[in-house]
Image: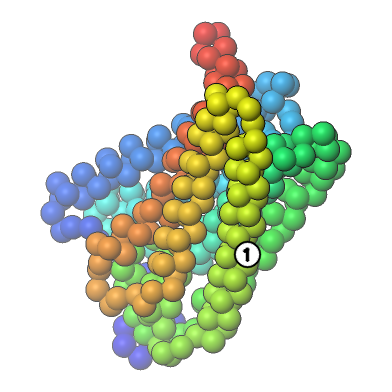
Amino acid sequence: MDNQTTVPYFLLLEFSKNRHLQLLHFFLFLVLYLATITANLLIISTVALDNRLHSPMYLFLMNLALQDLGSVSVIVPKSMVNSLMDTRQISYFGCVAQVFIFTSFEVSDFSVLTAMAYDRYVAICNPLHYEMVMNWKACTEITVWVWVISFLCGVLHTCSTFSVSFCSNVVNQFFCDIPHLLNLSCSSFNSAEAGVVVVSVIAALGCFTFIIVSYGLIFKAVLGIPSEQGRQKALSTCIPHLLVVSMFLLTGCFAYLRPSSNSPSYSEFGLTVLYSLLPPLFNPIIYSMRNKNIRFVLSKLWRV
């Protein structure tokens, strides 16, 4: 592939040449994918079918589940099929689609987490104004802006990433990950993608700061609750939220900002799994399954 300006396809990470290990990878990813899909579909169907959950907070939860569903569905099945069929190939346009869709869903995921932090802040710190501030019109506008911004970010990252010439087609990751694609560039520096990444990191850190400040104010309000049980309940809800957001942002930033190696790396693979596969699995558990209203509706549906 040396000195070639275009590539007809890319070769994704090969976990092993051993057929048994390839099948093991397939079944491990299958279990992880089915668990993620099941958890998120339960949240979507529960919120959609029960009228009591048709409120702004659950609208955000359903959007989060939709985005988690989309982000894993665009990268995991292809990796599973490759292991099952003993191949590594993904077409050029398949790679472009992966980058665009995955990036869009990841941006929208973090944007919704930011909106949810604001929703919790208003609900706990300004409960009397909640209905006025977080009304259906405001929540719909927030949701629309989330999808518009995520679409634009996906377009920017995709266009800047594939605007370069590739001197190799071997991607040392199980999907078309932007840092590894940039590592295949014939040029040593991609100014367009560097600019987009810098802007994205600044925006992500701004959202993260907003989330931290929101939860800081929530903790301050919670400490004023006279009931110890009420304090524990609020803290047990907020702390897991912060852990998931921190894991998602820090591992993502570290994976994007650190130099990618030219050979397969278990540490890079682990980081990619942390920010791409684990949050979609944990989000339904932490944000939804711990919610008593959703648990009640699910138990009711289960009995039916």
- Quarter that holds the C terminus: top right
The residue that appears at 40% across and 36% down in the rendered structure is 34
| Snapshot quadrant of residue 135 | top right
From the viewer's perspective, is 200 left or right of 78? right
Q: Is disc 1 placed on a helix, strand or loop?
A: helix
- Residue 210 sits above or below residue 188 on the image: above
The residue that appears at 61% across and 74% down in the rendered structure is 199
Residue pointed to by mark 1:
206
The residue that appears at 36% across and 40% down in the rendered structure is 32
Total numbered circles: 1
The amino acid at mark 1 is Gly
- How crowded is the residue under tag 1: few (<14 C-alpha within 10 Å), some, or many (20+)? few
Residue 26 position, x and y percent, is 28, 45
- Confirm whether residue 277 shows in the render: yes
- Quarter that holds the N terminus: bottom left
Residue 114 position, x and y percent, is 64, 52
The residue that appears at 35% across and 59% down in the rendered structure is 271
Residue 262 position, x and y percent, is 28, 77
Residue sitting nearer the eye, 232 or 176? 232
- Residue 269 sits above or below residue 263 on the image: above
- Residue 87 sits above or below residue 157 on the image: above
- Confirm whether residue 104 shows in the render: no
Residue sitting nearer the eye, 290 or 213? 213
Residue 142 position, x and y percent, is 75, 50
Residue sitting nearer the eye, 109 or 37? 109
From the viewer's perspective, is 125 left or right of 258? right
Residue sitting nearer the eye, 224 or 278? 224
